Image (tube, helix red, strand yellow):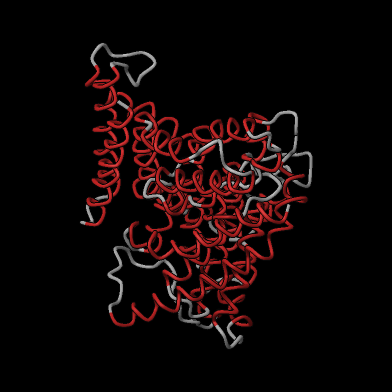
């Protein structure tokens, strides 16, 4: 039966990739393949995917949509629509243009665009350090870094990939996965995320950053040369122009350029890292939106017109749900179906042998978790699906669990942008105006190189 689950899992992946390559709607494709996977799982196992069955397994598969939607919307959707609603408002006010043009003017004097890209990658890593969520940190960087890159002449897809490839492998002192790994599988070690960041991540940061930057620049040169011969057919218009214009023509005060980054600053200050006060991303962005409305009332000397602009935020939130949050929900359904079948878990258990040396076990375990996350877009599946096997093998050969588990957290998050089901990959591809499969191909080499660099650093530096 295990072989059947493995084969069915592979079939589902192939079916989804083929549908996406045909440029069928990504949300529908993942929902369709996901419901097929749920039906197959229930038919083979005789178990319902619902905690409380409807009484009919066929309807259970569709009832699962509701459960998944509530979970996805709560975890990812609310943040998506709130942040992108504020971004849409900033674009409408031209505050984003003011910020981007002001910052881009001195930066654009740098002759090499690759130096600009490397600097942007470094800033994105810092953003991820203070904002652990992959989707939220991407949205922050998209609001602040992407316009600057575009106004510096960086191409649309290259600018998006600069952000995502930098965020992929960065963990930071606030990420939850280190605590999940050590707290669940090696509680006697009791290492916290800040301790892991200081003692481990900062030590491998420089070599991994160099590997990421070099591999990204080399692949960017290749893909841009290919783009010159065959330009991308963008599915959506870009929200930012790469033409620098006089800020006086924007018709707003120069200090409006601060409005797009104020929420980011507040999230950093009140995110719980520096102060005992911890405020979430959603309330901060909602507060900033209302604050800007009050500013507009004063600037335009009218209450009605300024307050009516709040509809721009709501419209942006609605559009974000239709285009982005819905894809995150569909990706969750597909990933859940793959997780239920368990074929990837079975396959990886077959590849990990307890007779490996400690270093080889670390490398194989890290790669296995990396691959699982890349295929499913679910870091939790990589962690809780494979780490028990890795721990069992480490115990068998009397290996130090602290050492063996070093790359697991980074491996589980580092390949997220390589999954057709990961919310951050779907949102990034949509913002880039290209199919998610094209986006993944563009990111694959630097992402894989960065992941391998982390695993090898953990194997030989500690």
Residue situated in front as seen by the camera: 351 or 51: 351
Residue at 59% of width from left, 60% of height from top?
453
Q: Foreground residue, 315 or 136?
A: 136
Lateral position of residue 130 relative to residue 243, left or right:
right
Q: Is residue 322 left or right of residue 82?
A: left
Q: Residue furthest top?
A: 55
Tell how many labels: 0
Residue sitting at x 59%, y 63%: 299
What is the quadrant of residue 127 in the picture? bottom right
Residue drawn at x 33%, y 26% is 64
Q: Position of residue 55 (x, y in %)?
A: 26, 11
Q: Residue furthest front?
A: 355
In the image, is residue 381 above or below residue 145? Answer: above
**Residue 18 location (% of width, % of height):** 23, 52
Q: Look at 55% across and 46% down and name the residue there.
A: 366
Q: Quadrant of the N terminus?
A: top left
**Residue 226 placed where, x, y %?**
34, 78
Question: In the image, 141: left or right of 318?
Answer: right
Q: Position of residue 56 (x, y in %)?
A: 23, 14
């Amino acid at each position: 039966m295990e072989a059947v689950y493995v084969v069915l899992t592979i079939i589902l992946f192939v079916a989804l990739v083929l549908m996406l390559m045909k440029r069928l709607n990504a949300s529908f494709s993942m929902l369709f393949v996901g419901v097929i996977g749920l039906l197959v799982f229930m038919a083979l196992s005789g178990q319902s995917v619902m905690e409380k069955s409807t009484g009919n397994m066929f309807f259970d598969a569709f009832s699962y949509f509701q459960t998944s939607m509530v979970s996805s919307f709560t975890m990812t959707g609310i943040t998506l629509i709130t942040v992108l609603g504020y971004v849409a408002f900033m674009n409408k006010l031209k505050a984003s243009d003011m910020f981007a043009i002001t910052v881009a003017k001195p930066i654009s004097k740098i002759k090499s665009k690759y130096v600009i890209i490397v600097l942007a990658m470094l800033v994105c890593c810092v953003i991820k350090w203070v904002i652990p969520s992959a989707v939220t940190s991407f949205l922050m960087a998209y609001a602040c870094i992407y316009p600057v890159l575009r106004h510096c002449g960086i191409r649309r897809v290259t600018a998006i990939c600069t952000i995502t490839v930098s965020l992929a492998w960065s963990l930071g002192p606030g990420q939850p996965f280190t605590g999940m790994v050590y707290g669940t599988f090696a509680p006697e070690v009791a290492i916290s995320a800040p301790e892991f960041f200081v003692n481990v991540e900062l030590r491998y940061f420089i070599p991994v950053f160099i590997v990421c930057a070099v591999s990204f620049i080399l692949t960017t040169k290749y893909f841009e040369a290919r783009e010159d011969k065959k330009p991308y057919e963008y599915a959506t218009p870009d929200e930012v122009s790469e033409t620098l214009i006089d800020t006086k023509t924007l018709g707003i005060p120069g200090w409006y350029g601060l409005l797009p980054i104020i929420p980011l600053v507040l999230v950093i200050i009140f995110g719980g890292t520096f102060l005992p006060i911890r405020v979430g991303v959603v309330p901060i962005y909602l507060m900033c939106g209302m604050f800007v409305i009050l500013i507009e009332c004063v600037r335009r000397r009218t209450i009605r017109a300024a307050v009516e602009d709040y509809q721009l935020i709501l419209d942006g939130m609605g559009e974000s749900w239709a285009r982005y949050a819905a894809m995150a929900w569909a990706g969750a359904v597909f990933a859940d179906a793959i997780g239920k079948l368990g074929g990837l878990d079975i396959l990886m258990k077959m590849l990990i042998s307890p007779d490996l040396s400690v270093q080889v076990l670390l490398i194989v375990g890290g790669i296995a978790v990396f691959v699982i996350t890349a295929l499913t877009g679910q870091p939790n599946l990589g962690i809780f699906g494979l780490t028990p096997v890795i721990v069992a093998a480490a115990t068998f050969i009397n290996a130090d669990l602290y050492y063996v588990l070093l790359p697991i957290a980074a491996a589980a998050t580092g390949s997220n942008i390589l999954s057709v089901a990961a919310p951050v990959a779907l949102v990034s591809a949509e913002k880039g105006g290209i199919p998610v499969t094209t986006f993944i191909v563009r990111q694959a080499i630097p992402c894989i190189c960065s992941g391998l660099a982390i695993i090898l650093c953990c194997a030989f530096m500690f």
